[in-house]
Amino acid sequence: MGKSSKDKRDAYYRLAKEQGWRARSAFKLLQLDEEFNLFENVTRVVDLCAAPGSWSQVLSRVLIKGETFGRSAWHDRDAKFRQRMLKVSASADQAEDSIREQDAPSSPDAKPRRDVKIVAIDLQPISPLPGIITLRADITHPATVPLLLKALDPDYVHENTVNQQQTSHPVDLVLSDGAPDVTGLHDLDIYVQSQLLFAALNLALCVLKPGGKFVAKIFRGRNVDLLYAQLKIFFEKVYVAKPRSSRASSVEAFIVCINFQPPEGYKASLEEPLGFGNRLPEILADKQAQLPITAPTPAMQNYGTGAWDAAPERPQLSSQITAIPDEDGIYDIQVQDLTVNRFQDIRWIAPFVACGDLSAFDSDASYRLPDDHVSLDPVQPPTAPPYKRAIELRRANGGAYGRKPLVT
């Protein structure tokens, strides 16, 4: 998170520096958790494309330090208020004692979780965070999977086989906030982002446990419904969410997948994406050969073999008889009307959910700063920004407009 000279960025940029977050994207994860309760019963997490580490910082403060934000903080405040009201209704003396206890300074009740394991991966270096294992690797490369499994399970031994890329200690949650450098060509940006999402999903399928969760950034386009239908194969519930802290002018959104349920016999590996790889045509051919046996309708039986081939116009079949055997070997005859296309009007519509308090700051609005406002420095300056070389060249050439320094 860089620094603006006049500090006129949106309110979440300033709020992130005030609360000690590395980037404003931390509020996106907090608002997603507020809506979907992502951190419930979660102790093992993988954070993909983690730099500069704002999402890992949220995980560290919530899971390791035991701090509460969003929904959990609201429940804690509500529980304390109920307890105070019960004490007030009990007796006046207890009410005075409870008021004194509330007025007395006390540290927040932190509830750290046990056996927490968090692994963050990115191509860029990440500054250390308490309790976070950082890996500098490429999530699109198959060699990253053994590194991740070794970080999650120190006793893991990699063998050069596809089926061995599984961990004996799977994770509860996989996050991915990665996005490519946008070009301004929306179709190209959406395509590149979809490939990054594809790589993150393949890696998540290698480490997720049944019932796990997967959250990833997407660029909303016309194929969001197709993405929703594909993810429904692996997850029970899939949502497209837009946090309040995400600018409405941005095409970014987040796909939230709940309750991981892999198909029977599925083996995940980056070497064979989604378990198929180059064997997809063979699998489709085998699937076609296993279709139910169909019998011709009476209209088709009126034609002999020669008459059928010699007929100038073949009759259009209005129905199809399908014989499906049950467990006792008895065939159940079903008649299907072929005049109606079953898939003509079917469309998968992804549920779109707005996250965050509607009364919170608007990320697209400009707020007037007070006269005594002090611009804070970023919590964590960029470690290795891709524009670092460009800045050095611009300074060497005399600034943004190529002006040479004045010689006095």
Image (spheres, rainbow, N blue to C red):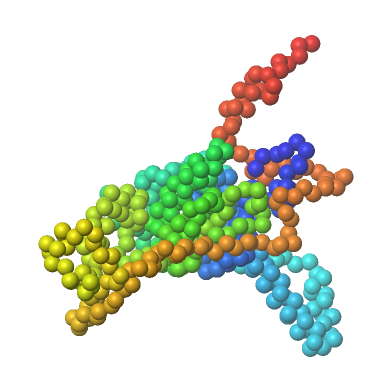
Residue 237 versus residue 396 in the image, above or below: below
Q: Residue at x 40, y 53 (%)?
A: 202
In this view of the protein, which residue sits in the foreground, 353 or 142? 353
Residue 285, quarter of picture: bottom left
Residue 97 location (% of width, % of height): 82, 80
Residue 59 versus residue 8 in the image, above or below: below
Q: Residue placed farthest to the front in the image?
A: 312
Residue 142 location (% of width, % of height): 36, 46
How many discs mark residues in the rendered view? 0
Residue 355 location (% of width, % of height): 63, 61
Judged left or right of residue 390, residue 296 is left
Quadrant where the C terminus is found in the figure: top right
Residue 238 location (% of width, % of height): 50, 64
Q: Residue at x 63, y 57 (%)?
A: 243
Judged left or right of residue 97, residue 215 is left
Q: Residue at x 31, y 73 (%)?
A: 336
Q: Residue at x 71, y 49 (%)?
A: 364
In this view of the protein, which residue sits in the foreground, 154 or 327? 327
In this view of the protein, which residue sits in the foreground, 74 or 256? 256
Q: Residue placed farthest to the right in the image?
A: 371
Q: Residue placed farthest to the top in the image?
A: 408
Can I make out residue 357 in this image? yes
Residue 336 versus residue 60 in the image, above or below: below
Residue 86, quarter of picture: bottom right
